[in-house]
Image (cartoon, grey):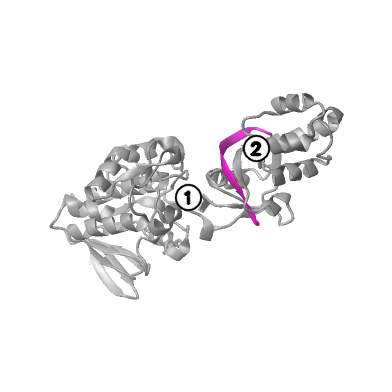
Amino acid sequence: MAAIWAGRANPQRNILLLDGSHKPGMKILVSGGGRCNVTHEDIDEQAYAGSSRHAIKKVLRRFDVPQTLAFFNELGVDLGQEDGGKLFPSIGHARTILDALHQAARDVGVGLHYPCRVEAVERHENGFHISGKWGCMEADHLILATGGRSLPQSGSDGHGHQIVLSLGHTVTRTFPALVPLTLPREHFICTLSGLSLPVTLDLRSGDGKRLQAFTGSMLCAHFGISGPVVLDMSRHYIAAKHADTRAELVVNWLPEETAGSLERELLALGRKSVVGHLRDRLPGRLADALCIEAGISGVIPGDQLTRKDRKALVKVVTSQPLPITGDRGFAHAEVTAGGVPLSELYLETMESRICSRLHLCGEICDVDGRIGGYNFQWAWASGYIAGGSVGR
């Protein structure tokens, strides 16, 4: 994106795009289950974390969703809206997006060289000396779009952070975001592998304060939990645990119910069995497991539940703590939390305040968004600004 707009802004510029991967655009190809969730119809700064949301907003508004739709439409790719506002190619898949971007880069004379991993960058009076096993070159301007540390097999293994540190920048603490979370292997959720359902996840501080909450689909897996709602929550959970080791994640298996409303339902069951009632609302395997977890016999009629057992069941169903043991790491993370703070960049150009003629865009910045096309929109917007400013 940066190379395309650098070329469009100044066709006379000599623009070279170096990619360390054997398959350039690998993150595009694997995104959205191979379909590429290009953006989201409702993008705003509230869906992002990391640097200040005011700074993020300044970048996003320079290249918004209508401009993204127009850009890809110009490249011959129509985007269609699907569930929850996600936008995918109407015809084709992720390869369609990558091919269109490659063609747009060729159209403005961009040279793409790969695999050419940049190992070192040195700043000198007239620009930069860039080198790797492939050789070396000089450049008067440099854009770093190396990504963070997520999906290191794609090439974004954190080396970009080392380069930018060598040029005088800082990098905030980095950790996986949009990543599945793990539970003890003996936990009952791990025995429900393959089960997917809507839940509410509540992140609470050690003193019980609600820090964040998301409702959406959760997937039970052999290692723990995944699915959109877990991925959205993961960066907030990891950050909270770093700040407060007592922070915990709580699940409500019936998002539309509160503890009070579920207790009233149980009191009104009469002769109907508890597990029968839960099976009307939840998958059978889960209903059975929740009764066991609460320490009650599921076949007991509602009117024979003791107050203690009723309270135990209500807690398990509506506010069950999840003993998270960790996450699946950068190899399974869709994005990196942390990076270069936006306060170190001129947001009108994405140029470094510390190292002139150096521009940064994409995931190397301390910006990460929710699942659903938000991180791609950050890439399109920041790449557009960085490329256009270098071209001018």
Disc assigned to residue 135? none
Q: Residues within 10 Å of mark 2 (few under 14, many from 20)?
A: many
**Residue 305 visible in this rendered orientation of the protein:** yes
For image coordinates 47% across by 63% down, the residue present is 152
Which residue occupies the foreground of this view, 176 or 55?
Answer: 176
Residue 357 seen in the current view? no
Q: Residue at x 35, y 75 (%)?
A: 133
Q: Secondary structure at mark 1?
A: loop
Amino acid marked by disc 1: Gly
Query: Where 97 falls versus 343 (above or below)?
Result: below
Q: Which residue is mark 1?
A: 338
Residue 23 occupies quadrant: bottom left
Residue 253's image quarter? Answer: top right
Quadrant of residue 262 in the image? top right
Where are the magenta residues, as a range?
208-224
Q: Is residue 107 above or below residue 131?
A: above
Task: Single out the residue that lies furthest toward the left.
Answer: 12
> Disc 2 designates what residue?
205
- Horizontally, residue 186 falls left or right of residue 63, namely right
Give the SS element for disc 2: loop
Q: Is residue 60 left or right of residue 158?
A: left
Measured from the top left, where is residue 354 in percent x and y?
34, 51
Work out whether residue 368 or residue 245 is closer to the camera in this orientation and state it.
Answer: 368
Q: What amino acid does circle 2 point to?
A: Ser
- Mark 1 → mark 2, Cα distance in angstroms: 21 Å
> Could you say where residue 331 lies in the image, as x and y percent from the top left?
52, 61
